[in-house]
Image (cartoon, rainbow, N blue to C red):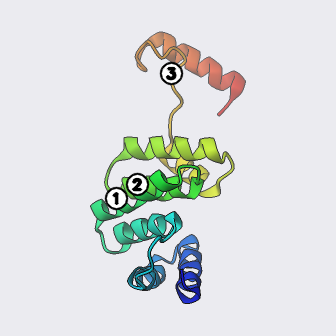
Amino acid sequence: MADSAETLLVRAVGFCRRDRWDEALPLLRQVQESGRPGLPALFYSYLGHAVARVERRVEDGLQLCEQAVKQEFYQADFYWNLARTQLLAKQREGAVRSLQKGLKLDRKHRGLLALHRELGVRRTPVLPFLSRANPLNHLLGRLRHAFVGK
């Protein structure tokens, strides 16, 4: 990537991380229009969420975020962007799975933890072979919460 495209990408990601997506998207578009081959997965992850969030092109955004995760499956930020984009697409279950994968990579990732709290993701039932509504799971779940906490 040329220095100017690289500089634009750094600035755009900075805007994204400060939740200034309207300012980031034009910079990401400039990077895209630079015609540079081999743009990093970071670019696709943030462009995907920006497109979904600002332009409401959620399906396009999902594809870009998924592409980034496939390229670099070890980046917690990419799972954060994917989860947020899945929520825009009303794919709550997918978002929860993405959150879990991201948190396995980085248990202290602020964005993932905040989104996890916001969604109120439940723990798996104590006895997963029984339904969540089973009275035994209710009792054991309450005991687990009393002794282990959240």
Instruction: Give me the disc on residue 63.
Output: 1
Please report the residue visible at 46 percent of the width from the left and 82 percent of the height from the top.
Answer: 31
- Type of amino acid under label 3: Pro
Horizontal and vertical percent for residue 99?
51, 46
Return the residue at label 2. Answer: 66
- Type of amino acid under label 2: Glu
Return the residue at label 3. Answer: 125
Q: Nearer the viewer, residue 149 or 112?
A: 112
Please report the residue visible at 66 percent of the width from the left and 48 percent of the height from the top.
Answer: 106
Position of residue 108 relative to residue 38, above or below, is above
- Please tell me which of labels 3 and 1 falls first in the chain: 1
Q: Is residue 100 left or right of residue 89?
A: right
Position of residue 13 relative to residue 123, above or below, is below
Q: Is residue 108 left or right of residue 79?
A: right
Q: Are marks 2 and 1 in contact (CB under 8 Å)?
A: yes
Gap in angstroms between the C-alphas marked 3 and 2: 29 Å
Position of residue 32 relative to residue 148, above or below, is below
Q: Label 1: state its secondary structure.
A: helix
Gap in angstroms between the C-alphas marked 2 and 1: 5 Å
